[in-house]
Structure formats: structure tokens, C-alpha cells
Image (spheres, rainbow, N blue to C red):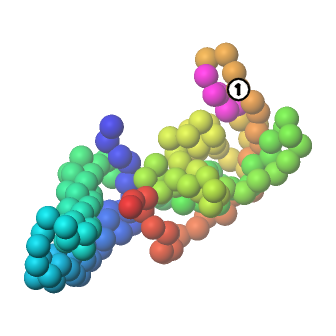
Amino acid sequence: MREQLTKSDVKKIQEEIEYRKLVVRKEAIEAVKEARAQGDLSENFEYYAAKKDKNKNESRIRYLERMLKTAVIVSDESREDEVGINNTVKIYFEDEDETEEFKLVTSIRGNSLKGMISTESPIGKAILGHKAGDRVLVKINEETGYYVVVREIQNTRDDSTDKIRGF
């Protein structure tokens, strides 16, 4: 599946790749050298741990580079009065008689525990493009769904330092 990324997401990924290549990679190589210098590799736990960390970093770099190659760049701009990416939205859940606040983000940054829902999630798909006051059906599957009301939309710039999902 091709990830949907905003320009801000791409910038954060490029920064992480650069950091991993210039800083983490050097530290990992040095840790492997130091562990190797301790002698017998057959019983050297530090050596295996250092190699594992080095390989984990290289794997993350390859993953991020592949993601950038296959990503679809989406705009995080929306009209003032409609739900878009990086907007904070207050949603009223009719069944529970509760209001919750979410930030709508791309799938790579989705984290429901932090109130960040993906545009690929059922509720994210449903409310995207709607206006304050709209009553929206959130479909879970073909037979099941529930209604929510978009109460308030706050346009927010994505200057945050939210981390991209990773290790």
C-alpha cells in the first residue's frame, strides 16, 4: 500500500534518514568496533547487541527511503470551514452522548492514544471534507455504522514535532 504523506511528513522522514545516516550509523559502527576489540566473538554479547542495533538502524533507513519512493504526496490545505488533514476537530458521538477532540493526520502519523486519527480510519474517511454542523455516518462495515456530528473545526499548521511511527 502506498502511504499518503504531506510535505511536512516527507520533511520529517528526510530529517530522520539524515540523522540515522550521519549520527546513529557512526555510533553503531563504533560500538561494533569496540565490542569486536574485546576478543572472542563466540561469547561476546556486546558484539551481537551492537550488530543488532546497527542492523536495526540500517533496516529503518531502507524502510523510510522505500516509503518516500512509493509515497503519494497529499495536500494538508483545506478550506477554512471544512475538515482537512492537520485540523483539530470536535466530534459529537450521538450513541454515547459524548464529544471528543481529534487531530486528523495521515496514516503514518495516526495514534489514537494521542488523539490523532488517520484519514484512512473509518471516522477519518467519514468526516474528511465535511463542515461544522454536518451529521455524518461512520461506516464500520457494510452493515454497521454510527452517526457523529462535526461540532467544531480548528485549522492548525503542522509545525509540530510529532514523531513518525517507527522503532
Q: Which residues are magenta?
A: 137-141
Q: Quadrant of the C terminus?
A: bottom left
Q: Residue at x 22, y 57 (%)?
A: 59
Q: Residue furthest top?
A: 143
Looking at the image, residue 44 lies above or below residue 130: below
Looking at the image, residue 92 lies above or below residue 79: above
Residue 17 on image: x %, y %: 25, 69
On the picture, is 112 further left or further right than 69? right
Res. 156 image quadrant: bottom right
State the residue position of label 1.
145
Residue 139 on image: x %, y %: 64, 28
Residue 11 at least partly seen:
no
On the picture, is 158 further left or further right than 72? right
Residue 144 on image: x %, y %: 69, 21
Residues 90 and 44: in front is 44
On the picture, is 65 further left or further right than 87? left
Residue 36 at least partly seen:
yes
Three-letter amino acid code of the residue under disc 1: Gly
Q: Residue at x 29, y 73 (%)?
A: 15
Looking at the image, residue 20 lies above or below residue 138: below
Q: Residue at x 59, y 43 (%)?
A: 124
Q: Is residue 139 magenta?
A: yes
